Amino acid sequence: MSGSNPAGDLKLEDVSIGELEPVTLSIATGEVVCISGASGSGKTRLLRAVADLEPHGGDCLLGDIRQSETPAHRWRRQVMMVPAESQWWHETVGEHFDAGDAPGDAVQALDLPGEATSWSIDRLSSGEKQRLALIRALVREPRALLLDEPTANLDAESIRRVERWLLEIIQHRELPTLWVAHDAEQIRRVSNRQFRIRDGRLRES
Amino acid sequence: MSIIDLTWWELALASLLVLALAVTSHLARLGMARSLLVAAARTVVQLALVGLVLEVVFELGRLRWIALMSVVMLLVAGREVMARQKYRLSGGWAFGIGTLSMFISAFSVTILTLTVIIGPDPWYMPQYSIPILGMLLGNTMTGVALGLDRLTEGVRRQRALIENRLMLGQSWSVAVGEIRRDAVRSGLIPIINAMAAAGIVSLPGMMTGQILAGTPPAVAVKYQILIMFVIAVGTGFGTLAAVSAGARRLFDSRERLRIDRLTAGSG
């Protein structure tokens, strides 16, 4: 889980989806931009547009790599979205990691026992799933992160631990990061800049 | 061996048994009496009509009439495939994919069987070509409909899972791979079960029909084996083609899952 090879800033150029007015935004390497807003305001859909999971207007750039000119699966491998509710399709946790993508010390860093990768998916709590989903995404060494409420299912102590761990990786690997959050305290703790979606517009707050 | 012909009066006696079942199911409040009677009436009308058509086509024995009848059978099967799906691809894709995959598999396997294996003269002799194509289409239709239904239902139900796999950088074909394999398997299970049980649990319909019509059992058995093999091949390739094409259509050129391309069917 090491490796630091920044690809550059993440730029949104007139990205439009649903009712949201076109968004132009630049996130520097290692910068965390938090987005908040009421439920249904379009926060998740904006992340989905940047991950190219839904048809949308505008384009995105990671360094000099253009979303519209890159095969979609390669773009998503570099600009990785972690959803609020993670999904699991194999029997055990370990099967969800590619060969060579060892979770390493991340498991301990997030207060999970070393044998967590051999656990059956059925026995995972929602908080364990959320932490393991973050590890699963980050071992793939993306160049930018799109986090959709990454601590929604965690207790206060785990939230702080996950925040510290994420910020350390984001800064060490210089990952431009879009972080959707509800909690004003958390936004203050983790963000370099904060935006809010209101009346279909993204405004810096 | 002479064939004992059935009179319409004798068939009417059999229909009384169906009527008895309808009355019983009505008394048992199963809510099936009406659909049972409608289905029985449809059987009589449809088979009587097809009997008349077959008499004419057999009499004429011309390729163009056989081809016309084959196309009608194919289009009806295509419509049936579409009607049997709970969620289907919109914009004519469900009909198009189902019909094209049945056309490719059922027609090519039928022509191959007629020209290479059975070898009637002419190769399209209606006595052979129409029953074989009919059985192939009927079974391929079931396989294709089951496969497409399982695919669209699976994709709809597991949308979040597929999208999470896409988020992790998997290609669309990997992300939908398990659902696609499961869909093909479900299309193939009926014919595999039928082959495994043939002769032990049940006597296959075609063989029974041939024996009733006076064919020696040894010959009927050989035809039944041939038919089951070609049905398995036709159903297998047809289902594979339909499910592969259907899965591809559920993703766009940017490998995005397009649930909006599905509409709820009445089936």
Image: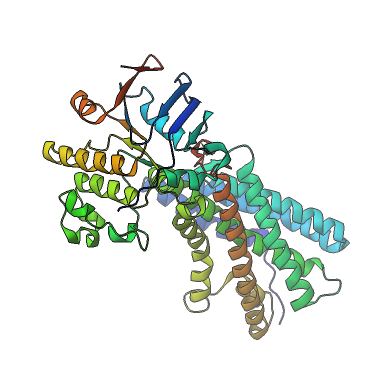
Judge left or right: residue B17 versus residue A147.
Answer: right
Colouring style: rainbow
Judge left or right: residue B235 versus residue A19.
Answer: right
In the image, A115 versus B74, the foreground residue is: A115
Quarter occupied by residue A191: top left
Judge left or right: residue B53 versus residue A179.
Answer: right
Question: Which residue ends up furthest to the top in the rendered image?
Answer: A199
Q: Is residue A185 above or below residue B55?
A: above
Judge left or right: residue A43 versus residue B81.
Answer: left
In the image, B153 versus A2, the foreground residue is: A2
Percent across and percent down for residue A72 are 52, 44
Question: Which residue ends up furthest to the left in the rendered image?
Answer: A157
Which residue is located at x 45 percent, y 34 percent?
Answer: A50
Q: Quadrant of the C terminus of chain A?
A: top left
Percent across and percent down for residue A135 are 28, 50
In the image, B16 versus A82, the foreground residue is: A82
Q: Is residue A131 above or below residue A114?
A: above
The answer to whether residue B12 shows anywhere in this view is yes
Percent across and percent down for residue A21 are 46, 18
Which residue is located at x 43 percent, y 34 percent?
Answer: A9
The answer to whether residue B31 shows anywhere in this view is no
Which residue is located at x 60 percent, y 73 percent?
Answer: B228
Percent across and percent down for residue A47 are 40, 33
Which residue is located at x 75 percent, y 56 percent?
Answer: B70
